[in-house]
Amino acid sequence: MPLKFREIKPDQASEIETISVLAKSILHEFYGPQMPKHHINYFLDKFQSTDAIKEQLNDSWKYYLIELKDVSIGYMGICFEREKMVLSKLYVLANQRNMGAGKAAMILTESIARKNGIKELELRVNQMNIRAIKFYKNYGFRVADDISTDYESGHTEHDYIMIKKL
């Protein structure tokens, strides 16, 4: 059975809650070995709480639940910024990785961008996330810049900005 990407609207409280619950599970599992727990919690509260997601959906964001056999296995979030589209979130449960969700997300992301006349995709990826960097490079992204961001939690993240021209 193929993967399904279901767009979530601001009034879909249950689906927004599902994204927030997935975020808590995935981010602690994935980033736990490399980031302090208090920063992950800060990030979740500030950007992936139900209120934060709803606010983003009411702005220029779109969120999609990634489903397999009607079970949510991950999510992605994109936003439109002027003449580019940013892939801000792409997270899949650990036991569902390497099964095609990332590839399907890249195809959907490009399709959405093209339908909206977008000529450039952008994303940020943690510099220590070698697997993701390699994945994005395989889909035509290139490192355009490296940045460091100091968060209120006291943690500094070191990311690459990666872009892809369409």
Image (spheres, grey):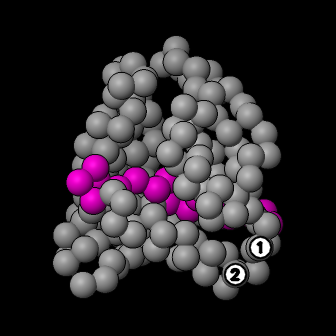
> Residue at coordinates 54% horizontally, 31% vertically from top-left?
128
Q: Which residue is mark 2?
A: 114
| Circle 2 crowding by C-alpha within 10 Å: few under 14, some 14–19, many from 20 | some
Q: Are marks 2 and 1 in contact (CB under 8 Å)?
A: yes
Estimate the x, y position of residue 91 in percent, counting from the top left. 40, 53
- Locate residue 158 relative to residue 6 in the image: left or right: right
What crowding class fits label 1: few (fewer than 14 Cα within 10 Å), some (14-19), or many (20 or more)? few
Asked if residue 87 lies in the magenta stretch, the reply is: yes
What secondary structure is the stretch in magenta mostly built from? Answer: strand
**Which residue corresponds to the image point at 43% horizontal and 23% vertical from the top-left?**
35
Q: Residue at label 1?
A: 166
- Seen from the viewer's position, the closer of residues 45 and 104 is 104
- In the image, which residues are magenta? 77-96
Counting from the top left corner in percent of width and height, residue 156 is at: 58, 20
Q: Is residue 157 above or below residue 110?
A: above
As rendered, which of 147 and 12 lies closer to the eye?
147
Instruction: Report the amino acid beneath label 2.
Output: Arg
Residue 163, x across and y down, in percent: 74, 56
> Which image quadrant: the C terminus?
bottom right
